[in-house]
């Protein structure tokens, strides 16, 4: 009794080779898919880093703009306070002169 005929042996070896090839091919496809996912993740991380840089630059620009505007407002407020102080001083001086004149007229 023959254990396996040569044709059955060839078919069995062919089937084994196909299964081994299919296994390695599926593993290779999985590795490629993982690599593509890794590349997509890396690209996303790079885009997030670029977005972070752009956001930081925009915040810096806006901060500088706000500081400039606050400086201008502060300068205007100081100028108005100085003007009001001068007006108050003149008013007090005029009031003092009037009081002096009124005191002379009554006295």
Image (tube, rainbow, N blue to C red):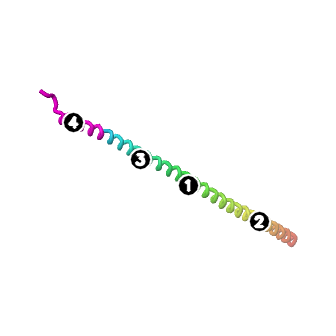
Mark pair 2, 3: CA separation: 77 Å
Which of pointers 1 and 2 lies earlier in the amino acid sequence?
1
Q: Residues within 10 Å of mark 4 (few under 14, many from 20)?
A: few
Mark pair 1, 2: CA separation: 50 Å
Front: mark 2 or 3: 3
Location of the C terminus by quadrant is bottom right
Mark pair 1, 4: CA separation: 65 Å
Which residue lies at the image location 15% right of the left edge and 28% below the top edge?
3
Secondary element at tag 1:
helix
Quarter of image, res 79? bottom right
According to the picture, the residue beneath numbered tag 3 turns out to be 36
Please give the range of residues in magenta.
Answer: 1-22
* Residue 107 visible in the displayed image: no
Location of the N terminus by quadrant is top left
Residue 47 % position (x, y): 50, 52
Residue 10, numbered label: 4
Front in this rendered view, residue 7 or 96: 7
Mark pair 1, 3: CA separation: 27 Å
Mark pair 3, 4: CA separation: 38 Å
Which of pointers 2 and 3 lies earlier in the amino acid sequence?
3
Secondary element at tag 3:
helix
Residue 42 % position (x, y): 47, 47
Which of pointers 2 and 4 lies earlier in the amino acid sequence?
4
Front in this rendered view, residue 17 or 88: 17
């Amino acid at each position: 009794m023959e254990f396996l005929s040569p044709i059955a042996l060839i078919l069995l070896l062919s089937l084994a080779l196909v299964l081994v090839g299919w296994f390695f091919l599926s593993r290779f496809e999985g590795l490629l898919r993982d690599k593509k996912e890794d590349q997509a993740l890396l690209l996303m991380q790079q885009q997030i880093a670029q977005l972070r840089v752009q956001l930081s630059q925009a915040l810096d620009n806006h901060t500088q703009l706000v500081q400039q505007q606050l400086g201008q407002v502060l300068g205007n407020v100081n100028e108005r306070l100085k003007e009001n102080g001068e007006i108050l001083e003149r008013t007090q001086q005029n009031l003092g002169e009037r009081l002096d004149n009124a005191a002379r007229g009554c006295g």
